[in-house]
Amino acid sequence: EESEAETQEAAPTESETRTQSTLTVFQSNKRLKSEVWKEYIPIGDREDGKKMGRCMHCQKKFCIEISHGTSAVTRHLEICPMRAGNSEVAKKYDPKVDRDMVSEIIIYHDLPFKYVEYEKVRARDKYLNPDCHHICRQTAGADVLKRYEMEKVKLKKIFADHKGRVCFTADMWSARTTMRSYICLTAHYIDDSWRLHTKILAFCDFEAPHTGDEIATKVLDSLKEWGLEQKVFSFTLDNATSNTSMLGVLKNRLQLANKLPCDGKFLHVRCSAHILNLIVKEGLLLIGGLLESIRNSVKFVKATRARIDSFAAYSNSLGIDSKAGLSLDVPTRWNSTYLMLARALKYRTTRHFLQRLNGSVEKSSVIY
């Protein structure tokens, strides 16, 4: 006689029971063939009659109507923290990692330090993780500076291991509002895999006097700070007199230690874009009076909102698309003058309207 233990079947586990229950209900509808339904348990209907189910791992509820598809339930299984194989999703909150990510966001998206104090940002952070620790703008600034120092150490090591030469570009300018002067020094180099890299080494204010000797001292200090004074190949600069003077001083200082290839023959590279800009500006002087008339016409139209709207309405009545509108050039950028002329030619048939709008608009303008 067989014993009771031998004849009695093993009791199904809780997981097997839930899976069998799921399959029994879902298999009753032949259209529910996706494997994802094996991990959801039906729990009845909502008040509106739609079928509901819950995740067998975390018990989260979902609508399991056929018309809703399987996208939502599939995505949930991929990130469900209680599901086997998703252990990396359930990582413990690490405040240090969070602060590192915040500083990276601020740097990458050029955000103000006050970003970490935005009310809605903090509310979203708390929603995503109730354990998150908020920081103030001062802490955010300190974290960004710390991140800069870390990246600076990494870049210094890259330069130290770099076996080739490095080319540089530099520029100086003054802010119109504050009249403070700034200097920017950028390094360009090709790595062992023949990839071109561009790195800003210095971006800082520069007190007067702006003589060639002072600029050379500032640049040389930056080169020494990054350990690049022995790897200089060339400097690309515009044609300002101070830059020419600066390169002369810098060349003499670098040659004292024989740190320039070909005795510095290729040290000074004049910016071709700046040269082209000077050539075009010189040529535009031949039509200076005509350009001034066009500028006056554009300034007149763009002076008030009412004039802009009236001009746009009249242009549309002539079949001219007025979305782009007129453009005013910037004296220091010759391509902006080209764009101004191109727009003016497009609206040249509006000359009679401008004459009626204001008789002071000069008739020599291309718009006429």
Image: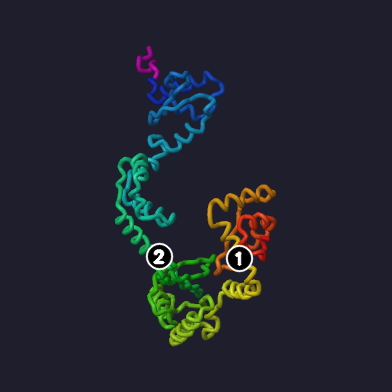
SS category of the residue bearing label 2: helix
Left or right relative to 78: residue 297: right
What sort of colour scheme is used for the picture? rainbow
- What's the mark number on residue 223? none
Q: From the top left corner, tell me how far across and down residue 256 is, in percent.
A: 44, 87
SS category of the residue bearing label 1: helix
Q: Nearer the viewer, residue 255 or 17?
A: 255
Q: Quadrant of residue 93?
A: top left
The kind of residue on which mark 2 rests is Lys
Which residue in the structure is indicated by mark 1? 337
Q: Is residue 224 above or below residue 341?
A: below
The kind of residue on which mark 1 rests is Thr
Q: Which residue is painted at 41% across and 53% down in the image?
A: 105
- Magenta segment: does it hold 6? yes
Left or right relative to 332: residue 61: left
In this rendering, the count of numbered labels is: 2
Q: Nearer the viewer, residue 284 or 227?
A: 284
Density class for disc 2 (Cα within 10 Å; few <14, some 14-19, many ≥20) is: few
Q: Is residue 286 above or below residue 97?
A: below
Q: Earlier in the sequence, mark 1 or mark 2?
A: 2
Q: From the top left corner, tell me how far across and down residue 146 is, in percent.
A: 33, 61
| Viewport quadrant of the C terminus | bottom right
Magenta region: which residues? 1-9
Q: Which residue is painted at 45% across and 83% down in the image?
A: 250
Q: Nearer the viewer, residue 9 or 366?
A: 366
Which residue in the structure is indicated by mark 2? 154
Q: Nearer the viewer, residue 156 or 131?
A: 131
Q: Which residue is painted at 47% across and 18% down in the image?
A: 49
| Viewport quadrant of the N terminus | top left
